[in-house]
Amino acid sequence: MRKYLFCLVLAVALAACQKTRTLEERAAELCAYIPDHELLEKSRDYMTEDFYAVLDTMFYRLPAHEAMDHEWLYYFVTGNGGTIADYEVIKVEQTDKNHAVATISVRQKWEDGSFDPDSDVEEYTMAMERVNGQWLMADFDGHKADCIRYIANNRKEQAIRQAISDYLLREIAPYYLQGEICIPTLMIVAEDEYEPESLSVWGDFWVFWYNIAGDTLKTVSGGDHPGMMAIRYENNQPQVVDFERVEDGARFTPSAKRIFSGRYEIFINMHSNECVREAVRCEQLYEYVLQNGLNVHYYQDYGWEAKQIESPGDL
């Protein structure tokens, strides 16, 4: 009887050991699909559906300059130093039938296989989930929550920018010489959310009308309208309810100082810097062209040479 019990315990122990080894092997396999500067299409088969979806949104569904503000997204483990991540699975702990957490160590190595002597060994955690009998990557170092939070904030910010653009198109654009399309340029100075359903946005807001000539947006008219826009949420959608504008002529400086207050220096530096303005304009034209499927690659103001509409990453 004792021999039988001993054999049973040994069999259970061996099974548990084999199970752990299998999980470690799977974790090592999944390491190959940890995003490093890009999210591979084939990673879809090695990640849970929701984790892949949030990463796909971050990498490919947001304006490029927005995502690039967060280097952790593109450089999950290697940074931007030209090294390659070398992974080692330290341990895997199964928390329940369908969930496990793997501890991963990472060292940096050069392309010739040698290790970077100045890099430390760093540890990360990889959440694993069993879906339809297959263990998949469900999270990496808590980045899923980072992505969800950022996407929510980004969508809120895009809704606010759309509300401002809609206001400019509705209330300001009709007073200009009109072309085929009107594309505002928003140079945001600051935002202040007083309560969940209302906020103020200070900025230098430009309106540009264009005609499309071949692959070029030809400027028909345009002008700027700096000031503060008051925004409130109606049916969960932001709407501009008031616009306090900076006055023209001799009243420009005193009215700008009153409206922008402690933000005046930021505003005036932005307002007077043509390079900054054109960079923002080009960036937002690129997004507009991309979103609307326009076959244009340049924009041109009257009397000036055409400028290429480039991706923010190329500027």
Image (cartoon, rainbow, N blue to C red):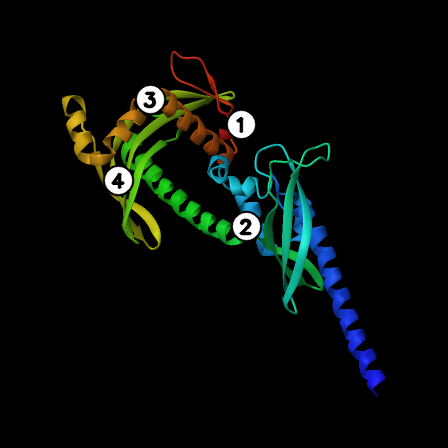
The numbered mark, 3 or 1, whose residue comes first in the sequence reads 3
* Residue 153 rendering spot, x and y as whole percentages: 42, 48
Q: Quarter of the image holding residue 59?
A: top right
Circle on res. 54:
2
Q: Quadrant of the N terminus?
A: bottom right
Q: What's the residue type where badge 3 is placed?
A: Asn
Q: What's the residue type where badge 4 is placed?
A: Met
Q: Name the residue tied to disc 3.
A: 273
Circle on res. 11:
none
**SS for tag 4?**
strand
* Residue 135 rendering spot, x and y as whole percentages: 69, 60
Instruction: Pick the residue in front: 208 or 283.
Output: 283
In the displayed structure, 233 sits above or below 175; it is: below
Of badges 4 and 3, nearer the viewer stands: 3
Other-residue count near label 2 (Cα within 10 Å), few / some / many at <14 / 14–19 / ≥20: some
Distance from the alpha carbon under mark 4 to that under mark 1: 33 Å
Q: What's the residue type where badge 1 is placed?
A: Asn
The numbered mark, 2 or 4, whose residue comes first in the sequence reads 2
Distance from the alpha carbon under mark 4 to that under mark 3: 22 Å
Can residue 225 be spotted in the picture?
A: no
Distance from the alpha carbon under mark 3 to that under mark 1: 29 Å
| Residue at x-position 44% and y-position 50% | 152
* Residue 138 rendering spot, x and y as whole percentages: 60, 56
265 vs 160, left or right, is: left
